[in-house]
Every structure is written in C-alpha cells, then in structure tokens.
Image (cartoon, grey):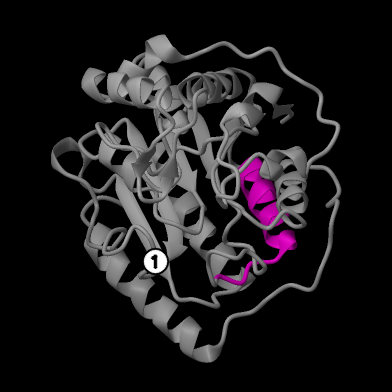
Amino acid sequence: MKIIYNKIFLEHDTESHPENRKRLEAFKNLRQTKVESAEKYLKLVHKKEYIEKVKKMSGKERFLDIDTVLSEKSFKVACYAAGAAILASKSGGFALVRPPGHHAGIEKGQGFCLFNNIAVAVQKLAKKNKRIFILDFDGHFGNGTAEIFYDTDKVLYTSLHQEDEYPYGLGKIEDIGRGKGRGYKINIPLLAESGDDLFLSSVEYFISIAKQFKPDVVGVSAGFDSCHSDPLLRLNFSVNSYYQVGKLLSQNFSNIFAVLEGGYNLDYLPKCVYNFIAGVNKEKIRFKEKTTESSLLTKKNYDNTLKNLSKILSPFWKV
C-alpha cells in the first residue's frame, strides 16, 4: 500500500476550519501522484441535482451546511479526491485526500464532506459485480456511506464509532439495512474513552463476518479522529492500534485500499496513517506508544452491545 496524494487537495480553502489544508501539509514532502477527476462518476452515488448544487455554490464560496465550507475550487478538488479514491481501489493504495467523504449522502453533503469518495470507488466496483467489505473506523458514524449502500447485499458496510456523537442519533446496532441490504450494515457504537482493546475486538468481530461475506475487495474509510489526542472526539486509541488493524486486515484479505476521512490532531495524524500502512504492508511498526485499555464499566457496556448485536445479526451471520 502506497500513499496517493496530489497538491490539488490543498486548494479546498477552509482557512481556520478544523478540516483544513494543514492536515495534509503535516505529512511534509509527499511525492505527488497523477490523479484524474471523477466528476463523471459522481452520479454513481449522488443525485444530479445535488452535484450541480455543489458546483454552483462552490463558485460563490458559501457554507453547504453549518459545518461544511465551500470555496471557489472546492467542487474541482472534491472531484479529484473521488478520483484518487478510484485510483486507490485499483492499485491497493491509500488515498490521502480532502475534503473527506463518508458523511456525504445521495443528495446531501454534511460533516465537512462534499462527495462520498469511498462510495464512488466502491459503487464503481459493485457495478462490475465485485463484492466489497467496507471497514469504517473513523470515530464518527459514516451515515452517508450507510445510506448509499443501505439496500444492497453487494456491499458489507461496518462502522465502529463513538456513541452519541455526530451525526447524532444515527449508527445504532438496530440499524442493519433494508430489503436485500438487511444484515449488511453493521454498527458498533463505543463509549467515550474506549481503548485499543475494544477497537481491536470490534475489528475482529467485523472481520469474522466479512470472511463469511467473502469480499473481492476491502475498502477502508480510514478516519483517525478516534486517536486519543484528537480534539473532536473522546475515544482513546493509540497509534499502535492502527498498525494492528492494518495487520489484521492484511492477514485475512489480499485486496485492500483505503481513503482518508477524519483526523484533526496534526502531530498524530501522520503517525496514525503511516502505522496503518505499515500494518497493511506487513512492515515493522513505525511509531510506538503505550497501548490503552478500557475501564471495566466500558468493557461491560461493550460486552452487552456485542451480545445484543449478535442476537440481531444471528439470522444473517454466524456470530
């Protein structure tokens, strides 16, 4: 797995917003990759009217919603971000892009996201009859991705995220999809202060189901706002845990790509990304720190969550 990056991703101008160009500048001296615009593929997951709305509003430098900023070049940059995700899905790369995407739904952008980068790439694969397992370990629930694939059994979408955080009221264990997609959308909400132990346990739970699903491709919505020092959330994952997750994925699957989502601590974001990539590549861990462990009360809550989730999923999977 190699980083896919282009300086065009810096041109989404959000100034003092938490999701700003400094997130990628923190990586320093990145080699640029030639990336193509995915404007023609956006309609795979987004309504034409919404695409045109973003295009029109970008020229006027407005807020798409209270959290989501548009600048003059935002539409163009977002099209290239989706293009990088497509390239990553073809090459097994890590698309280091902005704006992020997993909150963007069929006809609505929100939560810093304009277009759903990973969903565009995954839907392009699904159109070729590929089965795709999405692991979303961003600390926020990827409501846009879940919405886009809510009715299909070709995409297994799994998300672990902090409970009772943005987008509020969504990402519950009971929310498992609809129609053919029932049982193919799986959520594990975690209490604040959950540590590495519950992060890895959640990923192992998802992998046990994904192996029954037998995916052709694994796509990772790689958000690192779940790291212990991130300013937006209160999860407690160490940089070590992202290495372990990458390693778990590579031990169980062969065709893996990833797309950057959240992660807003500029000191820790590069460490988390490089550790995850090293894990996928089966290389030595690059950055180490003390692992974190959840409190007994948090573990008890997690055990109850898994027990209830397994009961809900029992008609669909061996859990």
Q: Is residue 287 visible?
A: yes
Q: Is residue 205 left or right of residue 94?
A: left
Residue at 61% across, 44% down: 249
266 in the magenta segment? no
How many marks are shown on the rendered structure?
1
Q: Is residue 73 above or below residue 281?
A: above
The location of residue 127, given as percent across then percent down, is: 34, 16
The kind of secondary structure element at disc 1 is loop
According to the picture, the residue beneath numbered tag 1 turns out to be: 165
Identify the image quadrant of residue 189.
bottom left
Mark 1 residue type:
Glu
Q: Residue furthest toward the left?
A: 179
Residue at 58% across, 22% down: 84
Residue at 34% across, 20% down: 56
Magenta stretch bounds = 235-251
Q: Main secondary structure of the magenta part?
A: helix
Q: Is residue 230 left or right of residue 296?
A: right
The location of residue 306, given as percent across then percent down, is: 37, 70
